[in-house]
Amino acid sequence: MADDTLGTDTPATVSVPDKPALEGLEESLGRRWREEGTYKFDPQTTRADVYSIDTPPPTASGSLHVGHMFSYTQTDVLARYQRMRGMNVFYPMGWDDNGLPTERRVQNYYGVRCDPKIPYDPAYRAPAQPAKNQRDWDVVSRRNFIELCEELAVEDELVFEHLFSTLGLSVDWDLTYRTIDDTSRAVSQRGFLRNLAAGDAYMAEAPTLWDVTFRTAVAQAELEDREMPGAYYRYPFFAEDGTKVYVETTRPELLAACSGLVANPDDERYRPLFGQKVTSPLFGVEVEVFPHALAKADKGSGIAMVCTFGDLNDVTWWRELRLPTRAIIGRDGRVAAEAPEWITTDAGRAAFAEIAGKTVFSAKEGVVRLLGEAGLLDGEPKKITHPVNFFEKGDKPLEIVSSRQWYIRNGGRDEDRRERLIARGHEIEFHPAFMRSRYENWISGLNGDWLVSRQRFFGVPIPVWYPLDADGEPDYDHPVLPTDEMLPVDPAADAAPGFDESRRDQPGGFTGDADVLDTWATSSLTPQIVGRWSRDEDFFSKVFPFDLRPQGHDIIRTWLFSSAVRADSLHDAAPWKHAAISGWILDPDRKKMSKSKGNVVVPTDVLEEFGADAVRYWAASAKLGADTAYEIAQMKIGRRLAIKLLNASKFVLNLGATESNVLAGDASVVTNGLDRSLLARLAQVLEEATRAFDAYDYARALSIAESFFWSFTDDYVELIKDRAYGARGEAEQASVLAALATTLDAALRLFAPFLPFATEEVWGWWRGGSVHRAPWPTAEHLAGAVEGADAGVLPTVGTALGGIRKAKSEAKVKQRTEVLSGVVSAPEAQLEQLRAGLGDLLAAGNARELTLVAGTGDLVVSDVELVPAEEPAQA
């Protein structure tokens, strides 16, 4: 929590370096923060004192890019603010080393493949050099593979940790986790088993989106539509009276899988056919014609072929019309080797033999050729471009196959649960608020429950075994489950409770579920993993529900929604109070930056060139939810601000400001109108910046602080030099030093969340402890100084000083040239403000006399008479 005893270890004297610099601060201060535990979370706490953050775990395979710096800085700014507000900030860091990217990286790095059926070898060591030919790669158990993943992840994570530390993330590095270690696997399996016990998880044989390359099921959230070239092929089915009923389809290769035809109930062309049978060309299979509102009269011929399964519409028609399942495409993406039982004619079986065993592409060519040879193609194919479903990481269109899979209920088939999850979204305050609609729209568009089983080797194993009957067939309705003490388990390698290994895959024995859980099924439990759910309930109660989930808007449908699903089912609660949604980083062509597109910028280069504070300034200048261009110019502005903070602070401290000058209650020392005006403006800034931060609008808080700071350095500091040096007596000097010290103190705290290195460096010149453990600045101690003060004095006097400077510039003389006389014309209210700061204006402008004249327009400085070059300036 914030340290309210700031003066206990204050340096006896101010110590300002001759040449302040940003270079090297990241390393020296980062090391000091680690050693001193500046950002450590204190577990001896109460929930009311905690601000907990469910930090996104970056994928620990590959490299980070500037997009990571962008979004993680925004989270860190919020964390630092909450810490200064007195909260005990729980700010962990995770590493997402579970999933396909890690699997691929480990395979290629070590030259190994995983086979879950192979027993664990505790003595296994990966080869020093991977074999060039994949056929020569080692084949290892799942547990050995996971150990290799953890081994390689440690190396990657050290690199990432160094980068994040260089960026200045105020993470407690003792609070780290991995999504594939023993703890995470146990939590993930425990969560699944609790869902299973509550009826929130179930197994079903159902149509499943399938990636033929990775040989795995794919969930709706992992779909990606890609525009692909295609063509409509038109050919007839035959009614009982010989009438030709033409269909137009992009997937003629599925003709043998046809279960029926559908047309819109209001389509007059097909009403006479509803309930009638038609026969498919080539394969001679009778199917019924059905009415269904999902059929579009204006699409193709207006009547659609329902194949099991060509697309998600087919699944809907199959389910609602109770059509037979006639699957011909297997998990390998090829047509079945034998003709199915529903094709009964010799001609139909001969036609099927022409496509049997072929890929989808080759089967399409074969069917089109057969139709052409039979004279059944009506016209030339109509070329089109249309959206096709892909796995987001795949490179071939998805197929839909019937398979046995595990699901978690998410409202896709349950209206009450759907409404409950939408209501959960209203328990979370989204920043920006409009992002909630993406959450709700996703839930409203769900067409099925969450498919969580994956046919991969690497991942969190599904913790289930199945007893085998006397024929060796699994009894899926009575799974064997592990005890809690056994977790984590690998059913493919560990024997089921009550059995020994010799009875694996034997009649009367058991078999283990070979699948793993979807990576989101584990990532959805990051609050539970890092919050020590099911391991330390007292600790969990101090952080859950979490205060903040920061993340990108592209994974609202996956990470955010899946986390809400699990918290709802496991805890009957929303997982967090706030969701901070960051935007994307765009390249100069306004395209999203991503490693797959090859348009990323390496963060180490940027940090070395501009420094962490400059990069953070760029990131914090963007509002939450806003896609932001990668801008070097903005980083240069941030670097300029950080350098100005160093140099202006040096100047202020060298004027004589010390910690003893900082106002702490008694403000009677501040007597000058200009000083009181500065502090009145400071009070406004503190209140506005605090409101902005409380609304999670850190970008506005930065803008407010920055605008005030430049006014402070460019106007106020220039105006008060004469008084600060004591030229107008001790009382005036004391007044200005109090204003300088108080403002510098507040400015450092205002900028601390954004520019942690520059502010900490300056703080150490004249204050004890760390600025990052200091309380957030408030206006309470300024009340005495600002009561009755006019905040407009400083900007008005600053404008007048600018007018004098402009006159000297136009006369092409040096700014220290003395002004004999001049006229300032302004409305009476501004003249009153000028009188309050007239002494400082005359000193800063080196003017003997300024005549104040009432006017009706803007403040204007005119008739400036300068000391002639030959006349010596008056002392």
Image (cartoon, helix red, strand yellow):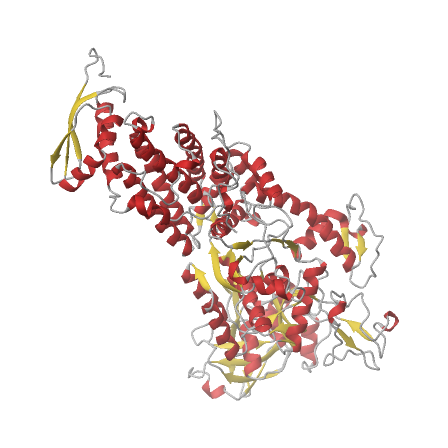
In the image, taking residue 535 as reference, residue 679 lies left or right, namely left
Q: Is residue 384 visible?
A: no
- Asked if 607 appears above or below 868 in the picture, the reply is below
Image x and y of residue 703, in percent: 37, 45
Image x and y of residue 79, in percent: 50, 51
Image x and y of residue 163, in percent: 59, 42
Judging depth in this view, the residue of 529 and 263 nearest the camera is 529
In the image, taking residue 70 as reference, residue 864 lies left or right, namely left
User: In which quadrant of the rendered image does the C terminus lie?
Assistant: top left
Residue at the top extreme of this rendering: 870
Residue at the right extreme of this rendering: 502
Judging depth in this view, the residue of 248 and 23 nearest the camera is 23
- Asked if 546 appears above or below 243 in the picture, the reply is above
> Total of numbered circles in the picture?
0
In the image, taking residue 364 as reference, residue 715 lies left or right, namely left
In the image, taking residue 714 as reference, residue 832 lies left or right, namely left
Q: Is residue 193 visible?
A: yes
- Asked if 782 appears above or below 493 in the picture, the reply is above
Judging depth in this view, the residue of 460 and 128 nearest the camera is 460
Quadrant of residue 813 within the rendered picture? top left
Image x and y of residue 223, in percent: 56, 63
